[in-house]
Image: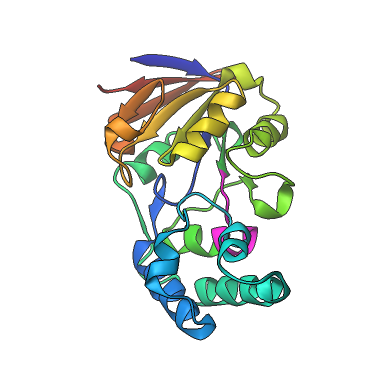
Amino acid sequence: MKITADALLFDNDGTLISSLESVYRCWSRWAREYGVTEEHFARVPLHGRPAAEIVADLLPADVVPAAVARIEQLEVEDAGGVVALPGTLALLESLPAERWAVVTSATRRLAEARLGQAGIRPKNVIAADDISRGKPDPEPFLLAARRLGADPARCVVFEDAPVGLEAGRAAGMATVALATTHRAEELSADVVVPDLSAVSAQATGGSVEITVAR
């Protein structure tokens, strides 16, 4: 399958990188500090959501600001074990820096800490700090398109989470799902691949020719 695009927009965790080890360590420590049980955690959707939303679902409103600051501190200070997923580095190295962006539900501080640990230093990052409504709202992807000067209809979203894919579709963009954290049958996208090793790209003038192995 071939797609011609003006911009490629990548989710971070579960798409470009795996931070599962760090996430488990940090959220487990945070939960102990705030008395959140495993049973309570199990009832709250986690993946692809900003930490502020997760914390607001778990704790009383009066402690949320301090609790959000605490989990960010833990995660920024402990990014050990964060690695690039298969295919990530090769694909990004083939792209002009001005033709792609990372679009993440994490804060900029946390996103840059994790990306740096994995050896990825993007020119363009859209983070939780930049938006008022997170995924599944299309705002993050639409903002990324504007930053890159691209028509949303000429953008491709790469995501591993259903909420992110929903946001990409709502933005009017093509979607490529990565079955890294969800089963393929759980993902609604134009194409589903195991990871970015199934994707290659070649820049041609102002656009990018994307090839997706199916």
Q: Nearer the viewer, residue 170 or 2?
A: 170
Residue 74, x across and y down, in percent: 52, 77
Residue 121, x across and y down, in percent: 53, 53
Give the residue drawn at x 48%, y 48%: 12
Q: Nearer the viewer, residue 161 or 60?
A: 60
Give the residue drawn at x 25%, y 21%: 214
* Residues shaded magenta: 103-111
Q: Is residue 8 visible?
A: no
Quadrant housing residue 138: top right
Q: Is residue 148 visible?
A: yes
Up-down relation of residue 97 to residue 48 (above or below): above
- Residue 35 on the magenta span: no
Q: Quadrant of the N terminus?
A: top left
- Residue 109 on the magenta span: yes
Q: Residue furthest bottom?
A: 33
Q: Nearer the viewer, residue 132 or 91?
A: 132
Q: Nearer the viewer, residue 39 or 189?
A: 39
Residue 98, x across and y down, in percent: 61, 35
